[in-house]
Amino acid sequence: MSLRERFTAEMKLSMKSGDKSRLATVRMIQAALKDKDIEARGLGKEPATDEEILSLLQKMIKQRNESAGVYDQGGRPELAENERAEAAIIAGFLPQQMTDGEMKAAIEAAVAETGAAGPKDMGKVIGALKGRYAGRMDFAKASGLVKAVLGAQG
């Protein structure tokens, strides 16, 4: 089942069960996806692939977590909790995340595969990882690990 089909099925389930917060979050995901498809169509591209959808979901989770932090600092814990709940629902659509050990092994393999020799080759390594592990790897964390691995080489 594609991610688009999962979103539709999840929306129907949420409607039937009366889970309003889950329904609102799934609708928000579908709206963001529709915006992405419209943008792609304007550029003469195909609708978003599953990898691009996973990237979009990760971006949405990051936005929710950042908003929750801002709400916490502003003394609005109820709004922060709402953002965290949305992030958790969105995260439910992502595949199982890689462990730190798996991430380190994947990074070392990507460094060897791309022939990266130092920090200047970081973009090559991250690009290879994004192509292979979209949705499964936390690229904010991976970026630091790649920098450490390439720094040790350079």
Image: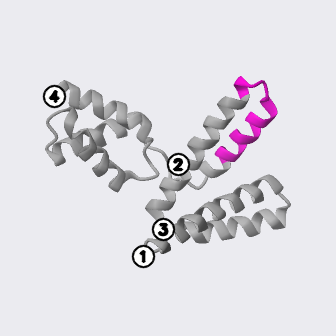
Quadrant for residue 102, please give it.
top left
Instruction: Please report the residue visible at 75 percent of the width from the left and 69 percent of the height from the top.
Output: 12
How far apart in space, not on screen, are marks 3 and 2 (Cα)?
14 Å
How far apart in space, not on screen, are marks 1 and 4 (Cα)?
41 Å
Left or right for 139, reference 36:
left
Going from N to C along the chain, the mark reached first, 1 or 4, is 1
Question: Mark 3–mark 1 contact, CB under 8 Å?
Answer: no
Q: Residues within 10 Å of mark 2 (few under 14, many from 20)?
A: many
How far apart in space, not on screen, are marks 2 and 1 (Cα)?
24 Å
Instruction: Please report the residue visible at 67 percent of the width from the left and 30 percent of the height from the top.
Output: 70
How far apart in space, not on screen, are marks 4 and 2 (Cα)?
30 Å
- Determine whether the residue tagged by mark 3 lies in a helix, strand or loop: loop
Q: Residue furthest front?
A: 42
Q: Residue furthest right?
A: 18
Q: Residue 9 colored magenta?
A: no
Q: What residue would you read off at disc 1?
A: 44
Q: Residue 74 colored magenta?
A: yes
> Which residue type carries mark 2?
Gln
- Determine whether the residue tagged by mark 1 lies in a helix, strand or loop: loop
Q: What residue would you read off at disc 4?
A: 153
Q: Position of residue 92 (x, y in %)?
A: 61, 51
Instruction: Please report the residue visible at 16 percent of the width from the left and 28 percent of the height from the top.
Output: 153
